[in-house]
Amino acid sequence: MSGPADIRVQSAPFDPGAELSAFTPLAARAGCGAVVSFTGLVRDLSGGLSAMEIEHYPGMTEKALAGIAADASGRWDLGPVLILHRYGRLGAEEPIMMVATASRHRRAAFEAADFLMDYLKSRAPFWKKESTDAGASWVAAKDEDEDALSRWR
Amino acid sequence: MQILYFAWIRERIGLPKEQVQTSAATVQELVRELVAREERYALAFSDLSAVRVALDQELSEMDAPLAGVREVAFFPPMTGG
């Protein structure tokens, strides 16, 4: 089983429900019995978030995401894979990104989605900047995000 | 060679990208050349543990050679997802 990877990097908003509805029949047709999806949302941690700006590196971003998807497909027997990530200005509670994976059985789909998220967080060239009442600041990378990659080695 | 800067490194240097003539053999040497130019570069590269580098859009290391490289990008640790 080896399905296509749908990689999208876009400024436009997306509807996670609609994406999942489109993804599910692709998975079914590929013989998959399990679909797992993850959606990341903008959180207002400080209570005063006015916007989140996401910057990325056009060209490298798409390559990095395609590479991460290919690595996942090499480790697990996957059907289609979706990686969608927004850039530009987002408001609180908006979806930032989603991944969806599909496989014959649930374990591979869960693990592959987890793997995609771990690598996407610290190996895909995106940077978040939060604007609040107190000003704007770049979100710092967390050591635990880097440490999470060691699970997969 | 084209150099790109992202996030707070871009803000500190005040440029998203620039064309540079260099004979630097490694990324480290290129950084030393840039830092020697102006204070804003010194500020951007003051803590190299917070700087990541990509060569021709592939993540790389500070001691990597620059021979044949067309595009160098400097940025902070990534915070996607």
Image: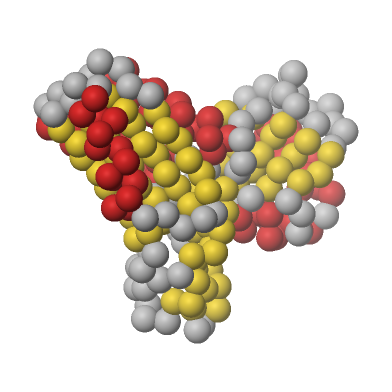
The location of residue A128, given as percent across then percent down, is 50, 58
* Residue in the image at 44% along x and 76% along y: A49
Q: Which of the image's four quarters has the N terminus of chain A?
A: top left
**How many discs mark residues in the rendered view?**
0
The location of residue A100, given as percent across then percent down, is 29, 39
Q: Residue furthest right?
A: B21
Left or right side of B20 for A97: left
The location of residue A110, given as percent across then percent down, is 18, 36
Can residue A69 be seen at all in this image of the molecule?
Answer: yes
* Residue in the image at 54% along x and 38% along y: A61
Question: For residue A32, what is the image quadrant?
Answer: top left
The location of residue A11, given as percent across then percent down, is 54, 54
Q: Nearer the viewer, residue A56 or B42?
A: A56
Query: Which color scheme is applied?
Result: secondary structure
* Residue in the image at 25% along x and 22% along y: A30
Q: Nearer the viewer, residue A48 or A144?
A: A48
Q: Which of the image's four quarters has the C terminus of chain A?
A: top left
Left or right side of A42 for B70: right
Question: For residue A58, what is the image quadrant?
Answer: top right
Can residue A118 be seen at all in this image of the molecule?
Answer: no
* Residue in the image at 25% along x and 34% along y: A25
Q: Is residue A87 above or below residue A58?
A: below
Q: Is residue A62 above or below residue A96?
A: above
Q: Nearer the viewer, residue B31 or B5?
A: B5
Left or right side of A88 for B2: right
Q: Nearer the viewer, residue A21 or A133?
A: A21
Left or right side of A11 for B11: right
